Image (cartoon, rainbow, N blue to C red):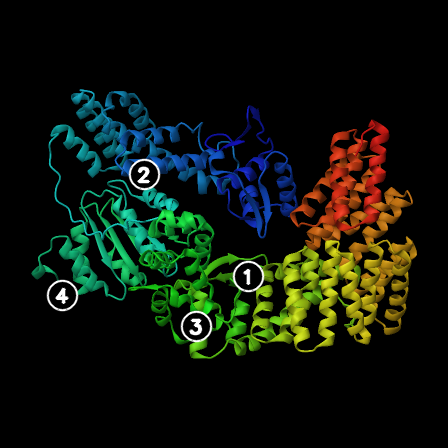
Amino acid sequence: MRFGVLGPLRVLDGDRDLTPGPAKHRALLAALLLRRGQVLTVDRLIAEVWGEEPPASAEPVLRVYVSALRKVVDGIRTVPGGYLLDVDPDQVDAHRFERLVSAGRRARDAGRTAEAADELRAALALWRGPALAGIDSGPLRRAYAVPLEELRLTALEERVELDLALGRGAELTGELRALVAAYPLRERAWGQLMLALNQAGRRPEALSVYQEARRLLIDELGLEPGAELREAHERVLARDASPRAVPNEMPPDVVDFTGRERVLDWIRGAVPTAGSAPVHLVLHGPAGAGKSAMAIHAAAALDFPDGRLYASLRARTPGAVLEDLLRSLGCPQGAVPTEPAERARLYRSMVSGRRLLVVLDDAVDEAQVRPLLPTGPGCLTLVTSRSPLLGLEAARARELDVFDPGESVAMLARVVGEQRVRAEPQAAARIAVLCGGLPLALRIAGSRLARRPDWTLRHLAGRLEDERGRLDELSAGDLAVRSSLALGYHALSDRERLLLRRLGALSAPDFAPWAAAAVLGAPADRLLEALAEAGLLQARGLDAAGQERYGWHELTRLYAAERLYGEEGTSGQVLAAAGREILDRTRRARALLLPAEPGSGQTLVHTAEQVMALATTQFRESARWLAAERGFLVATVVDFQRTGLDEAAWRLAFYLTPFFELGAHHEDWRMAAEIGLRAARRMGHRHGEALLLRSMADLYRARGHLVAAAEALQRALSLAEAGEVARTRHRLGLVHLARGRRQEAEACFVACLTAFSAAGDQRGRADALRALGGLRRAEDLLVRSLAAYRELGDPRGEAAVSLDLAGLLLDRRCPAEARERAERGLGLLRRLGDRLPEAAGLVVLARVAMAEGRPDVARGAAEGALGTFREHADRRGAAQALLTLAAALLDLDEIDGAVDAITSSMGEFDVLGDRHGLAGAEELAGEVRRRRGLRL
């Protein structure tokens, strides 16, 4: 499959044109294609598809658009935070174009002129018209169409330059005439036309072209031609003019430089043309990210006619640096002014008539850089800093992130040797992971291996595995990760250092300001911003709950933990103090997921309007907060257990259970529950052990491991306190029901209902009424359960029972009433943003449509549900959706599709041990056999 955005949007599968028709679908697909392989948030996609004023229904409509595109385009994945298109970059013409341009430039820099011209010619041939033609999205056009068009023109001029070097001037004149007609103010194109005409033996015409260009520039802009056009004129007049000597102070290029092609392309694309305004670029990132090597490597490939200057800033004053720069520009030592202001004025004067490249390495802040920026037309400044230098006027910044796994291993191979890396690929990959992709760490690891040919890569990987000694291992000669981080740490204020080292108590890769405040014991927003400015943390944008999130490199975290131990002692005290806030916030979020949870003794009575208001605010916000904090909270369970805070560990694991269940986060659920269970047992806390066994049983039941679930609940019953017995027995009844043991299940539910009623536990009573009503297919019990959930102010419970009632009414052949119930439940779930329960509601709605004789509608609902279940790896839900889909396909006489769906559902039900579901699938299979005589 091939995709095109360099012109009108185009989707081709072989000879078939699959281009979407609706404008919004095309805009959405274009947004995904332009950033293939990147996570795009829902909010960002909405802004790019609808602009500044999206409709209120934009989010669910976006999901519908994504679902529609998935029928045409493979590789659209739902990921935490949004969507991602996973296709090969060469399938998208824009990415292929950029790759070919980069390949052409590399060939040019290596002296392979003909190859370079061919690569650029192939890149330009991909264009079919203006980029994103027909895409109605201002944000996309501004962000991508304009830069792509500029890169096209630049690539065209570069290809012409190469063709001129190959002596093809006579072939270029027509193309260049068209180019200057379309872009009359591009001086480089005029200069190339002059050189092409001269090369073709048409020197008088070449000189005439210069006069034509000069008149146009004066008439349109009031300016004389710039240096590049004048130089072309001079070359035509005097072909043997010798170049003037220029300073070149760049340090030697890094021989084993690896990767960073996108950054190199960004720098090359930003190089100003002669006569245009100077450009200032800032490369920023954490210590050891390879900023200096990147700037030096990029500078080595750039040609600036008047020289290349280099200055290492660090803690030096601007005045001291200016003295060096003035001498490099030819100012005699005795003529350098003593006052910094005078030096700055002289520097500006000396660079005003030159086209220079200036590299300012390791800048501290904006004030240090400003006096050093060249002001001459066409000058380029590359600044490296740990800070993005946001206050630097008219500068463009780009963060230099760590290497991805492939780049990390490639760099290791460049330093150690390809043969040793190929001999131990798994060990090489592990070293890359333990170095966190940090170029400095990888270089040190490679240098140690290069000096120790007797060491295997596996041996070094083993030494790096120990977190406590990893920074000791990452030291070679005058290179050390620890010393690089220490420079940034000691430049911080006392409060900033205190926060950084206390954050070292956490193992989570990122966190929100409230968590930082918890470990510090005071508000931390400003301090976090300062740490991000210093390059020790990275601001990662807003999360699903609207909180700013900060992350850091793993080696920075180890350094912070090392400083915490050295200056304050173990991390247990910090975690104990922070634990109260962490547990309290999580408990409150859980309480909103489960209003008046069994055992809380809390009974809330709300009107229907109040319930709806809560459903659209607090309930949804609690789920979003838990979704945003899931990784942090799971890591904190591990932190609590690691530091001996067993009670905090088991309580946090228990509080997270309903959220894990709601989102089908089974792996996080398993890990947290197992850690919590061990913690409760270690401290001999019977109540905590019973609660975590109950959590493990819920997980087993969700995964279809019903025997294990029953065993866990039996152990929990032997430990449960009086108030917990009924709740544990209720879950045991659910397991019996799933195993087809209806009598045992009914006995459990009846006993629970009696116990909950006697204890005044309204939530427990509502749950028991629902379970018993579902088992007996008793509408009166379900209606009583529905009323109880409404009194409790629990829209999730209300939605679940509404769907149960819809199913019951379907069995009684009352489709109209069933639809009313199903749509009520589905509406509540959509307002809450609960994707998996919403998918279950879609299955019920599909069954309603089947009963109404609308199999086409049923098919759409079942397919939507199946997609959600598969995204969340919910096998039981997927099996039910497949069965419903099969019935719809059978009614549509799509027998082959029905057979596939039935076969898939049988496989799922068999793995889950769901005999009832398997029986339903067998019954439907029998209908297929009756219709077509097929064997399943």
The label number, if any, that marks residue 547 in the structure image? 1
Given residues 827 and 400, the one toward you in this image is 400
Q: From the top left corner, tell me how far across and down residue 813 is, in percent.
A: 90, 42
Disc 4 target residue = 338
Amino acid bearing label 3: Glu
Mark closer to the observer (1, 2)? 2
Separation of residues labelled 4 and 3 (CA atoms): 45 Å
CB atoms of marks 4 and 2 within 8 Å: no
Question: Which numbered disc flags the more N-terminal residue, 2 or 3?
Answer: 2
Separation of residues labelled 4 and 2 (CA atoms): 44 Å
Q: Residues within 10 Å of mark 3 (few under 14, many from 20)?
A: many
Compared with 179, 783 (above or below) is below
Disc 3 target residue = 562
Separation of residues labelled 3 and 1 (CA atoms): 28 Å
Mark closer to the observer (1, 4)? 1
Q: Confirm whether residue 394 shows in the render.
A: no
Residue at 58%, 34% in the rendered image: 23
Amino acid bearing label 4: Thr
Task: Tell me where residue 582 sits by quadrant.
Answer: bottom right
Question: Which numbered disc flags the more N-terminal residue, 1 or 2?
Answer: 2
Separation of residues labelled 1 and 2 (CA atoms): 42 Å
Question: Which numbered disc flags the more N-terminal residue, 3 or 1?
Answer: 1
Question: Which numbered disc flags the more N-terminal residue, 4 or 2?
Answer: 2
Residue at 54%, 69% in the rendered image: 515
